[in-house]
Structure formats: C-alpha cells, structure tokens
C-alpha cells in the first residue's frame, strides 16, 4: 500500500466513523441483544406462592419461538395485517403513481405547491395523525361519525367489520404523499430526449405516460412496495390509538401490538424473551414477503 | 498497522460510550456524615390546585437534612413504569421508592424487584388501615399503602328526587330503581368494559367472595364462586333489561353522558370523587351529586377494593430504613394527599378539599369514604400476573357491551387468563 493510499484509507475510516459508531450502537447492538434475549426466559427461584420473590434467567432454546409460532393470536394478527396490506398497498401505490404522473405532466400549474400539499400529511408525526383520525371516527367528537349507524353494537368506523378500513384510511392518508415523492424523483430522472423522440414519432401524452414513464419507474415502484410491505407488518400507531376507543380489539390485534404488550406484561407469557421472539418472527415474515414480492416482480418483468 | 490502531481506537470509543450509558445509583463513595439520598418515583397527578409532590418533599428535606429525598414524576402509564423499573433495577440504577398499584405488587415481588421490609413496616403499621395488607405478601411487607379505592356509589341526588327513587340498598332495589329511571331515559349505573377487571373483582369482594385465594403453597383461582356468579347474574339482568348504559369508563362518551344528565349514578372507585364531576363545574348540574355506600351485595355492609396504590421499597435501595421513615411521613400527610384526589390509606382522617365540597353540594365526602374504607374487604388479593388478566377481561367485556356475549364470559375469560398468567410465571395453581 502506498503512503497516499494509506492516508486516504485513514480519512475514509475517519469520515465513516460517526455513522459506523451510531449504526453499531443503535442498530446492530440492539438486534444482537434482542436475538440473545429471545433465547432466554426466567423461572421462579424457589417454589411457593411467590416463587421465593426472585427469578433466575435461564436459557430456554427455541421455546419462546415455538410459543410465538404456535400462538393462534400471532397468526390471526398476521392475517389482519396481510388483509390490510393486500388492499391498502395497491390503492396507495396507484394513487401515489397517479399523483406523481399528474405533477410531472404539464397539466398542473405550480407543481411545487401541490407537491408540498400532498406531502404534508407525512410531515405530521404518525401518532398525531392517528389521534386526529381517531377523533374523527369517534361519534362523540366527530363532525360526521354520529350520523352513521352502529354496526354490531359498535360505532360505525370502530366496528369489527370496518376497523381495518378505518386504519387503512389513516395509513393511506399519511403515506401516499411520501410514495408520490419516490415516483416523482424517478420520473424526473428520465431523460427528456425520450419524450421529444416520442413526440416526433407522434405519441400522445397518454402514450408517453403509459409506454415510457410508467415502465421506467418500475424500480421506484418496487422500492415503494417493499417499504410498504415492511411498514404494514409493523403497523403500530393506528391500532394502538384506535384500541383506546375500541376496547373490543384486544391487545394482540396486530403483531407489533402483541410484541409491545408482551413486553409490557399485558400478555402471558410476558417479558423480554417472548417479546423478542415475536419481533424476530415478525421480521422473518416481513423479510420473506419482501423477497417473494421482489422475485415475482422480477419474473414478471422478464 | 494503522488499520489495527484505528480499529482499536474505534472499539475503545465505543466501549467508553457504552459505559457512559450506565448510571449506577448508589456509588459506594459515600462519606460518613453525608446525607442519605433517597430517590422516589411516583405517578400522582400533580395537577392544578393540588399540593405538589415537590412541595411536600421539600418540607421533608428542610426538616431532615440527614435524609434527602428526590422525587420524580413518571408521566407514562403504569405498565410502562413497571417495565422501566424492571430494566433499571436489573442495571442497578433503580429508585429507592416507587408508587405501584396494589395489583402490581405481587408480580413485582415475584420478579424480585421489591425488598422485604417487614421489620421496618411493623413500626408504622398502626398508622394505616386495611390497605396495609395489600403491601404484604405471604407475611412479607414490601412498603406502605398510599391510597385505597373502595367501591362507593356516586349519584345525582336532584335527578333521583325528580324520578322519585332512593339510593338502593340491595341489588333488587338497584334493579328496580334502574328500571324506573331507564323508562325515563336516565341511567343510574354504567357497565364499563375497560374497568371490568377491577370493578367486577371489587364487587365479588363486596359480595363476600374473592377471585383468588391460597391453599397451602398453591394459588386457587376462584372465579366460579357463588359470589362471582351472583355479580355476573346481576349485571346480565341489568343489561338484558336495558337499565344500564354500556360505555367505557375512560371514554368521551362517559364524560358526555354525565354532562348530558343521561348517566345519573354509578358504582365508582372512591378516588373517582377527585375528578369524576369536573365536567359539571360551572353548569347548572354542579353540586347536585352525592356519594353513598354501595348496595348490599349479600355480605352486609361490605365493599371491595377498586384500585389504589402504595409506595414500595425497591431492590437495590441501599437505605431501606431511611426510605421507610420518609415513606411513612409522606403517606401520613393526608390533607396534602387528599388534594391530589386520593383517599389516603392512613387512618388519620383527611379534610374534604374545597373543590370536592363544592362538587358534592357541601357533603362531608371524606366521612362517607372513611366509612367505605372501614367496610373494605380485607380478604381480596391479586395474583402475580394480574396485568395480563385485565386486557382479556376488558376485551371480552367490550364484546358483551356490544351485545355479543354474556357477563359470565367475562369471568370465564378472567379465569383462563389467570391460569395462563400463573403458569407462564411458573407458579403453582389449582
């Protein structure tokens, strides 16, 4: 290695250090710790009513995973997020693509203003958005919910039949603008020569949008869908907030809620071990779904 | 070579940063003569017009230079505090004293987070009523009680008069009065799913039963008892007759029903007298409500515990004797605690705060609550893991309230989840 190269390597490391340290501390370390925790549980130190008032940490192997994987509550929660995603993700992605195409065309004046407007919901913290929408769903506070009939004895938007749609509405409202930006960035990276050539060949605006723009933002669509799948499996703000006014939902309605409440001692077995096992199982499911989607997408593209 | 040096530097920096995160509570560098330092974490409301915890603690600190107390308010939910305490105590960075609900005491003890301070507690026992028992587990006392929540009956006296009904003293009278009021679109009680675990267990206690008892070294889950069935049947009858409102206690619907004058009474925890009527301030309905004893659930003048909390000494506290000395002093400042909306567990009577007198038309609320405290069942205990029983009970009760199930299902859900909770903690249950 020449002196110069060594010098450069040193600077490279120095520049990377702040990120690397942060990454290790707040990302890698907690993951390693969670994986370790998932293999441990605790048992009463002694017999008796209160187990001697002390507990021991014990290695339990895959017991926590086995429990999470055989828990019907976990899979019905997973089923709910999948049903949610199967409808919400396509709706949101198509809406985002439509808005992006609109802003990229010459049909709209002041696209900057519209772009900001569509993006604004994403700038509102997720929990606040969930609170605002929960108020809109609550007959006592909402300007319109009181006019709608109860379903199965429960307020319209909060009833078992509609609550997933009510949550999907919040998510769509929040993330459509965000996904639109992903598409818009991809659209603006397309060389304008292509459009010019197409126009000379007599292509209409519609043809340019469907034959040039949409095929060329496929990569962006893949990214947006993958992020959405992962986000859906981790759905937390919406069910947490809505559950405060729809107590029938139970505290394992969705997997993330279940992991959280397991940690909080609200679901037996509780604690760090079982909660970590649920989280890791969730990550595995989300990861598999993302991989499956990417593979299917690639096959179709061929 | 350079690369290795750099890697070492990085690792050391990382290690230092990690060490910086740890925060051991009791550094063993105390000198003789230095004041003893006690940390105390609480969840009291500290609201407008209340005597602030910081001010009460300051009085202690000024009078006791040798024992200096730092009080911190925890703003999250009770469960979040429980998790924080568990994490902090394991890292040897926990507080000395913490406010815990009575139903959390057994599970915190099982997790090894509480200290046995029986000897110290004995010195102060005479200052406290029956709630002292809630801090004691199989003969080991872990702290001192702060407040208690006997079930009482809150009602709108003016509406009752207009409807020509009296405060019911038996369950049959209650049903009759409820039916009469419901015929006029008024409700003298609410079935509140989000409170059922505490509310129905307290009523079972009022009927002379318990949800849990001990048989030798085993827990007996007693949710099929005759007393429990009686409570279940009573509410089932009330719901079937449509003489009760079904809404969550901690919902806007509840507040609205009181403000509208549709809900004119409810079986409530004593501590609800501190804020339940706030929504009526400045309205024509202000000052119409009164508090009374709950009807006879079949065991005479008896009521059950609905909530309440104590201040426990946590594992790792280096000065339990001094901590208990402060603990006792703090929990006998009954007038200050009463301003926080509490029904102090100390025997010394508290003055009825001005706000309460105004909201209850000048009634001596404290006297009624003190009587309820005397009628409080001493037998009711919670199992370790009760925190996991509450959500299942709520979920089931919400379905019952929506008309999809029977009140007996709530007890059945509580039974199943109680067994699960005990089993997953590895405690013997029958």
Image (cartoon, grey):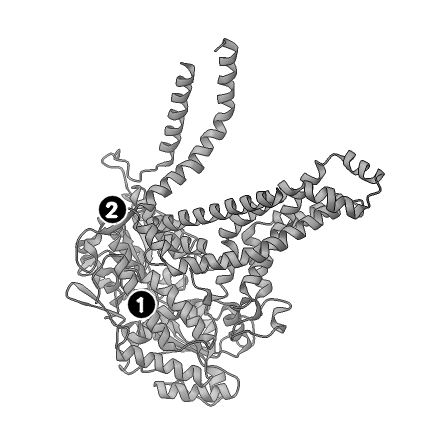
Q: Report the quarter where the N terminus of chain B lies.
A: top left
Q: Residues within 10 Å of mark 1 (few under 14, many from 20)?
A: some
Q: Nearer the viewer, residue B199 or B12?
A: B12
Residue B222: x %, y % from top left: 25, 72
Contact flag, marks 1 and 2 (Cβ < 8 Å) = no
The residue lying at 34 percent from left, 48 percent from top is: A272
Residue B289: x %, y % from top left: 46, 77
Q: Which residue is tagged 1?
A: B416
Q: Nearer the viewer, residue B168 or A138?
A: A138
Left or right: B55, with B376 as reference point: right
Indicate the secondary structure of the residue bearing disc 1. helix
The answer to whether residue B59 shows anywhere in this view is no
Q: How many marks?
A: 2
The residue lying at 73 percent from left, 47 percent from top is: A210
Residue B118: x %, y % from top left: 18, 56
Q: Are marks 1 and 2 on the same chain?
A: no
Return the chain for callout 2.
Answer: A
Q: Residues within 10 Å of mark 2 (few under 14, many from 20)?
A: few
Q: Nearer the viewer, residue B214 or B149?
A: B214
Q: Nearer the viewer, residue A7 or A93?
A: A93
Indicate the secondary structure of the residue bearing disc 2. strand
Above or below for B192 versus A193 = below
Q: Gap in Å between the C-alphas at discs 1 and 2?
A: 26 Å
Residue B184: x %, y % from top left: 52, 87
Q: State the image quarter where residue B346 is shown.
A: bottom left
């Amino acid at each position: 290695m020449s002196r110069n190269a060594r010098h450069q390597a040193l600077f490279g490391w120095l520049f990377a250090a702040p990120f690397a340290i942060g990454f290790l501390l707040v990302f890698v370390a907690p993951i390693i710790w969670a994986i370790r925790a998932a293999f441990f549980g605790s048992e009463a130190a002694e017999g008796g009513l209160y187990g001697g008032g002390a507990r021991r940490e014990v290695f339990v192997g895959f017991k926590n995973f086995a429990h999470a994987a055989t828990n019907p509550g976990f899979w019905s929660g997973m089923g709910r997020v999948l049903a949610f995603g199967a409808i919400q993700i396509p709706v949101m992605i198509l809406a985002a693509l439509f808005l992006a195409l609109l802003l990229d065309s010459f049909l709209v004046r002041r696209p900057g203003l519209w772009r900001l407007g569509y993006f604004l919901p994403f700038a509102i913290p997720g929990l606040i958005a969930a609170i605002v929408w929960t108020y809109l769903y609550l007959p006592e506070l909402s300007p319109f919910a009181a006019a709608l009939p109860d379903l199965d004895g429960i307020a319209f938007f909060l009833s078992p039949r509609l609550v997933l749609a009510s949550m999907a509405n919040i998510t769509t409202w929040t993330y459509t603008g965000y996904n639109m930006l992903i598409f818009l960035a991809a659209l603006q990276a397309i060389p304008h020569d292509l459009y010019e050539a197409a126009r000379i060949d007599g292509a209409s605006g519609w043809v340019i949008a469907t034959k040039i723009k949409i095929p060329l933002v496929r990569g962006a669509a893949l990214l947006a869908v993958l992020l959405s799948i992962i986000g859906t499996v981790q759905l937390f703000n919406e069910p947490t907030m809505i559950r405060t006014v729809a107590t029938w939902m139970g505290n394992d309605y969705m997997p993330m809620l279940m992991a959280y409440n397991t940690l909080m001692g609200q679901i037996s077995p509780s604690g760090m071990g079982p909660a970590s096992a649920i989280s890791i199982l969730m990550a595995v499911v989300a990861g598999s779904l993302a991989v499956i989607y990417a593979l299917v997408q690639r096959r179709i593209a061929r | 070579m350079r690369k290795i040096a750099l890697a070492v530097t990085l690792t050391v920096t990382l290690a230092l940063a990690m060490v910086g995160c740890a925060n051991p509570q009791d550094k063993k560098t105390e000198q003789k003569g230095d004041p003893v330092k006690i940390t105390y974490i609480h969840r009291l409301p500290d609201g407008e017009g209340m005597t602030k915890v910081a001010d009460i603690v300051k009085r202690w600190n000024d009078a006791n230079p040798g024992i200096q107390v730092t009080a911190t308010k925890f703003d999250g939910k009770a469960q979040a505090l429980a998790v924080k305490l568990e994490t902090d105590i394991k890292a040897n960075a926990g507080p000395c004293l913490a406010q815990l609900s009575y139903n959390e005491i057994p599970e915190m003890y099982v997790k090894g987070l509480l200290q046995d301070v029986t000897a110290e507690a004995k010195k102060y026992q005479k200052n406290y009523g029956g709630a002292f028992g809630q801090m004691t587990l199989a003969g080991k006392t872990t702290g001192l009680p702060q407040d208690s929540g006997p079930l009482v009956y809150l009602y709108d006296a003016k509406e009752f008069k207009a409807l020509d009904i009296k405060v019911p003293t038996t369950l049959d009278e209650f049903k009759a009065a409820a039916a009469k009021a419901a015929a006029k679109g008024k409700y003298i009680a609410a079935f509140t799913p989000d409170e059922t675990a505490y509310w129905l267990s307290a009523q079972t206690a009022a009927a002379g039963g318990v949800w849990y008892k001990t048989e030798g070294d085993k827990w007996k889950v007693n949710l099929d008892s005759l007393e429990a069935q009686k409570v279940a049947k009573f509410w089932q009858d009330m719901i079937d007759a449509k003489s009760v409102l079904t809404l969550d206690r901690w919902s806007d619907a509840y507040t609205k029903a009181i403000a509208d004058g549709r809900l004119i009474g409810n079986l409530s925890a004593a501590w609800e007298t501190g804020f339940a009527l706030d929504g009526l301030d400045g309205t024509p309905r202000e000052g119409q409500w009164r508090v009374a004893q709950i009807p006879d659930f079949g065991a005479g003048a008896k009521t059950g515990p609905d909530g309440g909390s104590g201040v426990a000494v946590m594992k790792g506290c280096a000065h339990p004797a001094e901590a208990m000395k402060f603990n006792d002093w703090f929990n006998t400042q009954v007038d200050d605690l009463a301003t926080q909306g509490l029904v102090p567990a100390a025997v010394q009577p508290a003055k009825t705060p001005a706000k309460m007198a105004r909201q209850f038309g000048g009634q001596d609320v404290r006297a009624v609550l003190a009587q309820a405290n005397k009628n409080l069942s001493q037998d009711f205990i919670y199992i370790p893991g009760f925190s996991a029983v509450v959500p299942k009970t709520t979920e089931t009760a919400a379905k019952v309230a929506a008309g999809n199930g029977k009140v007996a299902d709530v007890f059945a859900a509580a039974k199943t989840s109680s067994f699960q909770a005990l089993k997953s903690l590895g405690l013997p249950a029958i």
